[in-house]
Image (cartoon, helix red, strand yellow):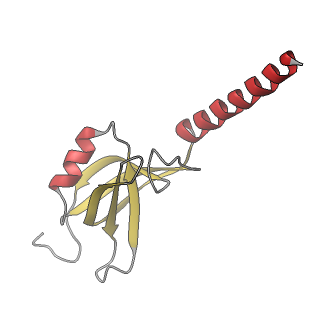
Amino acid sequence: MKKTLYIILGSIFLLFIAYFAFVYYVPYSEGTRSGELIKFSKKGVISKTWEGEISQGISGAQIFQFSILDNKEDLIRQLQENEGNYVKLTYIERYSTFFFWGDTKYFITEVREAQSPHFRDR
């Protein structure tokens, strides 16, 4: 009886580890988005995560929401410095996420300053 219980619990644990590895290492899509960085903050009750938004239109009608993992200090610093500016973000979209990673499935891997197509003086 104990042996069967250990096999069942071990199988459940291995399935969880396999799911976690799949979500972390297998991206659903990769790409870039450009827009004005309108929001970047650390939020959460139990687990604090970095979340942001860029506006992709002149009226702010199309908003792209993204998350950043805590171990990406250089990206966090770059985004804090560029709030209100036009940026180009490279991202990875994952199949799913966990509450301690972020609210969205889009995770930023690179930040670059860009020229706004609407306002050439920015």
Residue 15's x, y, as percent? Answer: 71, 32
Quarter of the figure that contains the N terminus: top right
**Residue drawn at (12%, 69%) of the image:** 122
Give the farthest residue toward the right.
Answer: 1
Is 23 placed left or right of 103 in the picture?
Answer: right
Q: Quadrant of residue 26?
A: top right
85 to 22, vertically: above or below: below
* Residue 16 vs residue 89, the one in the foreground: 16
**Residue drawn at (58%, 41%) of the image:** 23
**Residue drawn at (49%, 49%) of the image:** 99
**Residue drawn at (38%, 54%) of the image:** 44
Is 60 placed left or right of 84 in the picture?
Answer: right
Q: Quadrant of residue 41?
A: bottom left
90 to 1, vertically: above or below: below
117 to 82, vertically: above or below: below
* Residue 1 vs residue 99, the one in the foreground: 1
Give the farthest residue toward the top.
Answer: 3
